[in-house]
Amino acid sequence: MNDNSQATTQLIREWMELFTTRSMHDSWRYVKAVNLSMPQFSILMRLYYHGQCGIADMSERMEITAAGASQLVERLVQSGLVRRAEDPHDRRARQLTLTESGREVIERGIDERYKWVKRLVSTLSEEQRAEVLRVLPMLVETARGLQEK
Amino acid sequence: MNDNSQATTQLIREWMELFTTRSMHDSWRYVKAVNLSMPQFSILMRLYYHGQCGIADMSERMEITAAGASQLVERLVQSGLVRRAEDPHDRRARQLTLTESGREVIERGIDERYKWVKRLVSTLSEEQRAEVLRVLPMLVETARGLQEK
DNA sequence: GTATAAAGTTAAGCCCGCTTAACTAGAAAG
DNA sequence: CTTTCTAGTTAAGCGGGCTTAACTTTATAC
């Protein structure tokens, strides 16, 4: 490995260290502010990004028991952030989706979390932005590819 | 705002979203695996990145009461991950530091979390890596500047 | 030197996440 | 049609995070 792999890895790590720390902290503050727990928030996020799913999927994804997932979801249904409908094709199963207000909570959270990105971008020159636009999509694509499996 | 700011912001957000989601998920798994809670882990992280501090600093940073911080630290001292010494200059205060095993836990956690960065980089071509190396440092620099204040 | 403020600790108590175990209801298999 | 499997719920119970309130100990101000 005497190519540029090492340097690239190091660079991306630095970037992540700078920002995931920050991002996680901001998330945490927001979550507290809207009176949710982190697990509850994860469920909303999951529904926001991956759409409808059932209790079983959710419990698998979060690596908790179905019982735990069921209770977590129950609280979110109570607070009106999640809709829990019966699956018409399998009446044992549930279809979980975000309600309008659930979606709002998540979207405000994302905005909050990434306010600083706007600030960051505004301090870049037009050329620098162009560079970012040229290079970053490739990284995003690749990362997304890895995510799949 | 009819330049490329909007697109750039959007792009960086997407990128960050991918990374933080992934990073948080991995952290969570690791934390469970080593039998810690997330707040406990945050304390270790703080100590790792910012070095020694007292209960008061800790409670301020984590936005919890001093009582809460004290209890959290107590558990970490019990499990041998944190050292709690008396400050020689102010005997009311404590000096919190990581023990060797605390440091190990964190370092293994970081490695774990960034394993997939290596995978990501390894699927990039040499040219792609060169591009990243050319563009990302500028982002990191700018971001660090913003962080300061 | 006494009053006051600051750093931590301890205990009581609440809420939540999560687990196991026992259950209900519906689907699939024979 | 009965057996077996699957999706989800409910209850009991543990343990942790966090808060408030009541301390103890040490430093600072007057």
Image (tube, coloured by chain):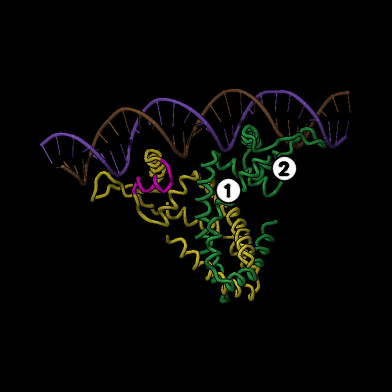
Chain colours: A green, B yellow, C purple, D brown
Give the quarter of the image for residue B123. Answer: bottom right
Residue tagged 2 = A53
Reply above or below: D17 against A49.
above
Residue A149 lies, in percent from the top left, at 70, 56
The residue lying toward the viewer, choosing from A108 and C25, is A108
- Give x and y (percent) for residue B85: 30, 48
Identify the main secondary structure in magenta: helix
Q: Quadrant of residue A61?
A: top right
Give the CA separation, mark 2 to mark 1: 22 Å
* N-terminal-most mark, 2 or 1: 2
Which amino acid, mark 2? Cys
Do discs 2 and 1 belong to a common subunit? yes
Residue B55 falls left or right of residue B119: left
Let me know if residue A80 is in the magenta part. no
Left/right placement of residue A18 relative to residue B53 reads right
Name the residue rendered at 59%, 58% in the picture. B16
Q: Residue at x 53, y 46 (%)?
A: A30
Question: In the image, what residue occupies the spot 62% across and 40% down?
Answer: A64
Q: Residue at x 53, y 63 (%)?
A: A120
Q: Nearer the viewer, mark 2 or mark 1?
A: 1
**Residue at which label 1 appears:** A109
* Amino acid residing under circle 1: Gly
**Residue D9 sits in quarter:** top right
Task: Name the element at disc 2.
Answer: loop
